[in-house]
């Protein structure tokens, strides 16, 4: 890797700044003054300081609600205050489970013990430098957030990734999981969905293990020699039914403030829609291997075979029994969000909050997830603080947040959003970073109206590898596309990206943008810098792993701080909100085409004409208003108000079927995927279940939402 030296870097920033002063940036009448502030900001985020933040934040395990977690809240609050932000630590009282005792044992048909665990996460201290963090005494046993206590003994059935298709495949083969313990591997869907489906199919418990084919030795050298998961590594994580609703399980739609009376909380015996009723626990592949190896019954479908050195069977014959004994302390616990604000100066824009955030809590040390993002955010705050000292003030109010208890179910962000919903309906953006840095490859996801906004920001930020982040991002995507085409079609079909610009992903769930976008309709983005990362949610996601494999000199932390900060600055000071509804409309039209093909394949006779007409109207309105945005009137208050209202108009007041907390008609986490976005979810999920009446009703809701949004944009474009 070619690293740019400090002098060369400062010269590059100056060159980029000079270029930015002459360029047209969407949302600005004249970008020249903003370009000067950008250059001042870009010179501030410091790689060394980012490394110091990371080392401090990850010195101890800091599970949500723990004393160590509160210590990180104080650290972040001190940095916010030092930068000049008006800072508050905001507590919430939420339902969390903490393991008291976790025991998993497996026996063969002769009663001989196959394994007893979970085994401690440990690597040989004499090889490749070992791991200096693995023996800290305050590491909690590996567990699943939201799992109940339980004591169950049952036969074992292997169910691959535990997807809807996997459970259907088992049923087609005549294998029932009723009253069984289901063994599934991580990947393909959210772990909570695995438990959700197992519970629906009558299982008594679930064990979720990390297969080496997915993030272990099959992918490359394991830690500490390489970045991938060693045999004892365990992926912790929440199994809350996130696709139903996130946040505190007892208070959907209500902020779980410390003074909230118990009468407004759902009682524990009423949480079946959001919390599992069967126990689950994660395992390493070291502990899962003896169970899998001893299973008999049919050979698993060959696509279900992992990388352990034996043939995987499906089990369910009584040849292997597992005893799960889980004791959980389930109680209301206090968590702490840290909120820093900078007031806006423009009276016409004071209600248009720009919110940015990252979560702080971790399952263990959390060097990559999430504190690489926290370190980058703190250096972005450092840069904003330096601008404040030089006299800069934002036109819009800036709110920067360090969320707590994200790992348990996006709790800190969701409770804050629910508490401030009346203000946030006017918020103009939420910028998220979670896994800030695990390697050198920049990536982003966004609502379509902000995809070009993200691209423009990355054109201003220098990459540690030379050029701009945008240039490196595009080159990587072109290389990946070429390699994919070469591998699948042969060398004669080599070509570049099959589009005109870099791909920006869609937002599903699994991080703190969820309540902003999918509950309140606040336009959102999510950024990160990626690389081989096999130690997710394990003891080994620590500072030692980070400096060996992710970002040894913290230059990508610096890069991410710059991008995150420029997102905030540009949105805070733009003359006209830089929303691209033209692209949004094109994307929705494409989503409808895909849904129509899916319906035809399922032999559903549905009328898409009304929805297609509404999508065409929305796209046309987006095109017309974009022309006005490019040449805005002197007074932009009503235009900005309409632009912001158009995203809110895409919400359905009734919410999605089975899960009304999710209100966005264009994007939601899939009921059976969890992390991955399902586009036009009401329609597509009804089509997937071959439910024609529901699909027809959802097409109507979608059409109404698109027409509402189009009417707002049409009105604005006539100014």
Image (cartoon, rainbow, N blue to C red):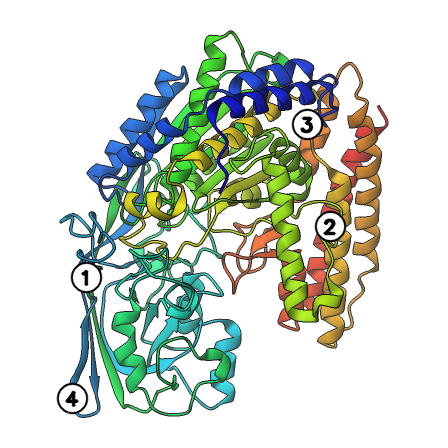
Disc 1 versus disc 4: nearer the observer: 1
Give the residue pinned by disc 2: 587
Earlier along the polypeptide chain: callout 1 or callout 3? 1
Contact, CB < 8 Å: mark 4 with mark 2?
no
The image's mark for residue 111 is 4
Q: Position of residue 606 (x, y in %)?
A: 77, 68
Label 2 vs label 3: CA separation?
Answer: 20 Å
The image's mark for residue 378 is none
**Which residue is more in the foreground, 53 or 142?**
53
Residue at point 77% right, 61% down?
Answer: 593
Earlier along the polypeptide chain: callout 2 or callout 3? 3
Label 1 vs label 3: CA separation?
Answer: 51 Å
Give the residue pinned by disc 3: 577
Instruction: Classify mark 4: helix, strand or loop.
Output: loop
Residue at point 34% right, 22% down?
Answer: 79
Instruction: Classify mark 1: helix, strand or loop.
Output: loop
Earlier along the polypeptide chain: callout 4 or callout 3? 4
**Which residue is more in the foreground, 713 or 396?**
396
**Which residue is more in the foreground, 708 or 479?**
479
Earlier along the polypeptide chain: callout 4 or callout 2? 4
Earlier along the polypeptide chain: callout 1 or callout 4? 4
Give the residue pinned by disc 1: 120
Q: Residues within 10 Å of mark 1 (few under 14, many from 20)?
A: some
Q: Residue furthest left?
A: 137
| Horizontal arrangement in the rendering, residue 378 relative to residue 17 (left or right) | left
Residue at point 61% right, 24% down?
Answer: 570
**Depicted 633 relative to depicted 666: above or below:** above
């Amino acid at each position: 890797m070619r690293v740019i030296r400090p002098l060369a870097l400062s010269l590059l920033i100056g060159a980029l700044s000079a270029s930015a002063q002459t360029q047209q940036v969407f949302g600005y009448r004249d970008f020249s003054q903003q370009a000067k502030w950008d250059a001042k900001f870009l010179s501030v985020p410091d790689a060394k300081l980012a490394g110091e933040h990371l080392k401090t934040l990850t010195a101890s395990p800091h599970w949500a609600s723990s004393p160590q977690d509160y210590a990180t809240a104080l650290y972040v609050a001190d940095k916010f205050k030092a930068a000049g932000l008006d800072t508050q630590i905001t507590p919430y009282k939420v339902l969390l489970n903490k393991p008291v005792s976790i025991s998993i044992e497996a026996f063969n048909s002769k009663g001989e013990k196959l394994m007893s665990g979970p085994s401690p996460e440990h690597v040989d201290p004499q090889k490749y430098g070992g791991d200096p963090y693995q023996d800290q005494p305050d590491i909690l046993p590996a567990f699943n957030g939201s799992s109940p206590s339980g004591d169950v003994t049952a036969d074992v059935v292997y169910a691959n990734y535990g997807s809807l298709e996997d459970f259907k495949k088992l049923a087609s083969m005549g294998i029932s999981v009723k009253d069984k313990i289901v063994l599934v591997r991580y990947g393909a869907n959210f772990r909570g969905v695995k438990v959700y489906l197992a519970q629906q199919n009558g299982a008594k418990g679930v064990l979720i293990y990390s297969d080496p084919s997915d993030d272990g030795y099959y992918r490359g050298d394991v830690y500490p020699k390489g970045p991938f998961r060693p045999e004892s590594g365990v992926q912790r994580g929440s199994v809350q039914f996130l696709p139903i609703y996130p946040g505190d399980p007892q208070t959907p739609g209500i902020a779980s403030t410390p003074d909230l009376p118990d009468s407004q909380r759902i009682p524990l015996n009423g949480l079946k829609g959001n919390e599992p009723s069967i126990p689950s626990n994660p395992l390493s592949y070291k502990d899962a291997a003896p169970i899998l190896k001893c299973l008999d019954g049919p050979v698993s479908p060959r696509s279900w075979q992992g990388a352990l050195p034996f043939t995987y069977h499906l089990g369910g014959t009584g040849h292997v029994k597992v005893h799960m004994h889980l004791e959980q302390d389930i109680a209301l616990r206090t968590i702490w969000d840290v909120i820093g604000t900078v007031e806006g100066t423009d009276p016409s824009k004071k209600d248009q909050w720009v919110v940015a955030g990252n979560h702080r809590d971790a399952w263990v040390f959390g060097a990559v997830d999430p504190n690489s993002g926290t370190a980058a955010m703190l250096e972005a705050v450092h840069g904003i603080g330096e601008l404040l000292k030089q006299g800069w003030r934002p036109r819009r109010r800036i709110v920067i947040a360090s969320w707590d208890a994200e790992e348990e179910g996006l709790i800190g962000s969701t409770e804050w959003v629910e508490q401030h919903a009346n203000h946030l309906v006017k918020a103009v953006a939420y910028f998220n970073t979670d896994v800030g840095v695990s390697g050198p490859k920049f990536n982003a996801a966004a609502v379509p109206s902000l995809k070009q906004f993200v691209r423009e920001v990355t054109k201003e930020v220098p990459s540690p590898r030379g050029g701009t982040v945008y240039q490196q991002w595009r080159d990587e995507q072109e290389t990946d596309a070429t390699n994919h085409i070469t591998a699948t079609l042969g060398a004669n079909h080599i070509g570049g990206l099959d589009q005109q610009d870099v791909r920006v992903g869609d937002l599903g769930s699994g991080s703190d943008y969820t309540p902003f976008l999918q509950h309140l309709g606040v336009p959102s983005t999510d950024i990160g810098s990626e690389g081989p990362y096999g130690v997710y949610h394990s003891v080994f996601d620590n500072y030692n792993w980070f400096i060996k494999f992710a970002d040894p000199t913290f230059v990508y932390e610096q890069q991410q701080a710059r991008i995150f900060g420029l997102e905030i600055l540009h949105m805070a000071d733009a003359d006209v909100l830089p929303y691209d509804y033209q692209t949004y409309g094109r994307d929705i039209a494409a989503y409808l085409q895909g849904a129509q093909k899916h319906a035809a394949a399922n032999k559903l006779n549905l009328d898409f004409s009304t929805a297609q007409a509404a999508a065409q109207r929305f796209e046309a309105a987006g095109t017309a208003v974009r022309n006005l945005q490019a040449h805005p009137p002197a007074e932009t208050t009503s235009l900005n108000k309409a632009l912001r209202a158009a995203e809110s108009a895409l919400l359905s007041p009734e919410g999605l079927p089975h899960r009304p907390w999710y209100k966005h008609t264009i994007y939601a986490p899939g009921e059976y995927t969890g992390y991955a976005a399902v586009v036009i979810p009401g329609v597509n999920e009804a089509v997937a279940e071959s439910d024609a009446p529901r699909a027809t009703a959802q097409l109507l809701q979608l059409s109404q939402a698109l027409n509402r949004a189009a009417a707002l944009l049409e009105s604005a474009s006539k100014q």
